[in-house]
Image (tube, rainbow, N blue to C red):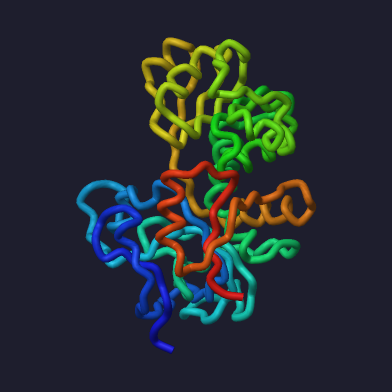
Amino acid sequence: MTTMKAVRAHHRGGPEQLVFEVAPRPEPARGEVLVAVHAASITADELTWEETWTDRSGPGGRDRTPIIPSHEMSGVVAALGPGVIDVAVGDEVYGLIPFARDGAAAEFVSVTADVLAAKPVTIDHDTAAAIPLAALTAWQALVDHAALQANDHVLIHGAAGGVGSFAVQMAAHLGARVTATARQGDRAFVQGLGAADVVDYENDRFEDRVKGVDVVLDLVGGQTQARSWRVLRPGGVLVSIAVPPDPSLAVKHRARGVYFIVEPDRGQLETIARLVDSGRLTPIVDRVVPLADSRAAYEGLETEHHRGKVVLHVAG
């Protein structure tokens, strides 16, 4: 087999550039694994990232079009490149694909072996595909960058979304007190994830309800981030994946600001898989759509409200 079905964009742009077509099947290079994709998950703004289209995150990268989107996947190892010894053909795996290479909206994807971990055994591939990017982002924000501790108070903005739904569960698992912002219609859902208090951001101002928090996890940016400084205790930390926090505001409020981009991490995926299999972490899937309907799924991310992740079903 030398070809496969894939979703590709031949020119830069948004979802309107995506086409479902026959494409060359990749071959694994040294240190790489060919995965037969069973499911992939999509992210709202990935078509705006520089590394989606080039081979680097900053300016001056080499154009990679046509590109294949979607960087979190679950599937079965189909072939091994030279030098791979820690996975085997037939293994069920999941992982986060580095952003500056083709993604998993296709029947096959070739990735370096070190970004793959064994899929949680208690869930199917569609559910597993909802985990890697969102759960790794939440884990790295709370554990690596915020150093969240038991009994800390954390405020999580955007708690009903893909990252937020994992962050609420993880923070509660770590023993923190969780306050979250979400729509009124998502209140019960977010409380069910482990939030002690949910602020309806459409009708209430969180800064009137919350103060002295140890950690703010900002998944929104804009005025939400700017208003968040005043609820932090001195010495607290604001962690954002939306936009870099203003250093001058961090100094003014005697707090710390952190911006980061999630990175693949096999060890963390293994930890997350154990949490899933033990029932302490539940991936939230908004809906599953066929691979052929990927363009409409990406368009929906721009216009519709979602709980958790939208997953592309590829095979199985």
Q: Residue furthest bottom?
A: 1
Is 279 displayed left or right of 301 in the figure? right
List x then y, in percent, for residue 144.
57, 38
Q: Residue furthest right?
A: 278
Q: Position of residue 3 (x, y in %)?
A: 39, 83
From the top left corner, tell me how far across and down residue 30 is, in percent.
43, 76
Q: Does 255 appear above or below 302?
A: above
User: Residue sitting at 62 percent across and 38 percent down?
Assistant: 167
Residue 305 visible here: yes
In this view, the residue in front, 240 or 194, is 194
Rendering coords of residue 315 (x, y %): 57, 74
State the image quarter where residue 63 is shown: bottom left
Q: Nearer the viewer, residue 15 or 102?
A: 15
- Determine which quarter of the picture holds residue 176: top right
Q: Quadrant of the C terminus?
A: bottom right
Residue at x 62% of width, y 15% of height? 210
Q: Is residue 221 above or below residue 137?
A: above
Is residue 40 placed above or below 202 in the rendered structure? below
Residue at (48%, 50%) from the top-left corner?
263
Residue at image position (72%, 47%) is 281
Q: Is residue 115 visible?
A: no
Count of numbered badges drawn on the protein? 0
Q: Is residue 312 above or below residue 154?
A: below
Q: Which corner quadrant holds the N terminus?
A: bottom left
